Amino acid sequence: MNRLETLREILASLKRRRPSRKYCPRCGNPHIRLSNYLWILPERYICEKCGYEGLVVLEAEKD
């Protein structure tokens, strides 16, 4: 298999993925929201339970 075919397979598998659920890294709460919607800035998340604000969240994928 050449490199182009391998790349196509990888991109196709990424396309089929469902969005993963995001969790607060401090308390594990799944109820977090984006604090800004500007496309030029990095996404900042706010936890509704513990008040965490940051760029990092945990993501869980279903198998």
Image (spheres, grey):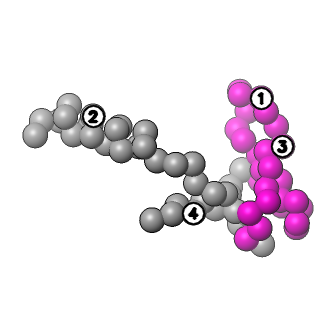
Residue name at image x 27 percent, y 34 percent: 8
Cβ–Cβ under 8 Å for marks 3 and 1:
no
Secondary structure beneath dot 1 equals: loop
Q: Which residues are magenta?
A: 28-54
Q: Of helix, strand and loop, which mostly describes the magenta segment?
A: loop
Per the image, the residue denoted by label 1 is 38
Q: Amino acid at mark 4?
A: Ala
Q: Earlier in the sequence, mark 1 or mark 4?
A: 1
Q: Position of residue 51 (x, y in %)?
A: 89, 61
Per the image, the residue denoted by label 2 is 8
Q: Position of residue 55 (x, y in %)?
A: 72, 50
Mark 3 vs mark 1, CA separation in Å: 10 Å
Mark 1 vs mark 4, CA separation in Å: 25 Å
**Is residue 31 in view?**
yes
Q: Amino acid at mark 3?
A: Ser
Q: Earlier in the sequence, mark 4 or mark 2?
A: 2
Mark 4 vs mark 3, CA separation in Å: 21 Å
Q: Amino acid at mark 2?
A: Arg
Residue 2: name its quadrant: top left
Residue name at image x 79 percent, y 33 percent: 37
Magenta region includes residue 39: yes
Q: Position of residue 10 (x, y in %)?
A: 31, 42
Per the image, the residue denoted by label 4 is 60
Residue name at image x 73 percent, y 70 percent: 28
Residue name at image x 46 percent, y 47 percent: 17
Per the image, the residue denoted by label 3 is 35
Secondary structure beneath dot 4 equals: strand
Mark 4 vs mark 2, CA separation in Å: 25 Å
Mark 3 vs mark 2, CA separation in Å: 35 Å
Secondary structure beneath dot 3 equals: loop
Q: Earlier in the sequence, mark 1 or mark 2?
A: 2
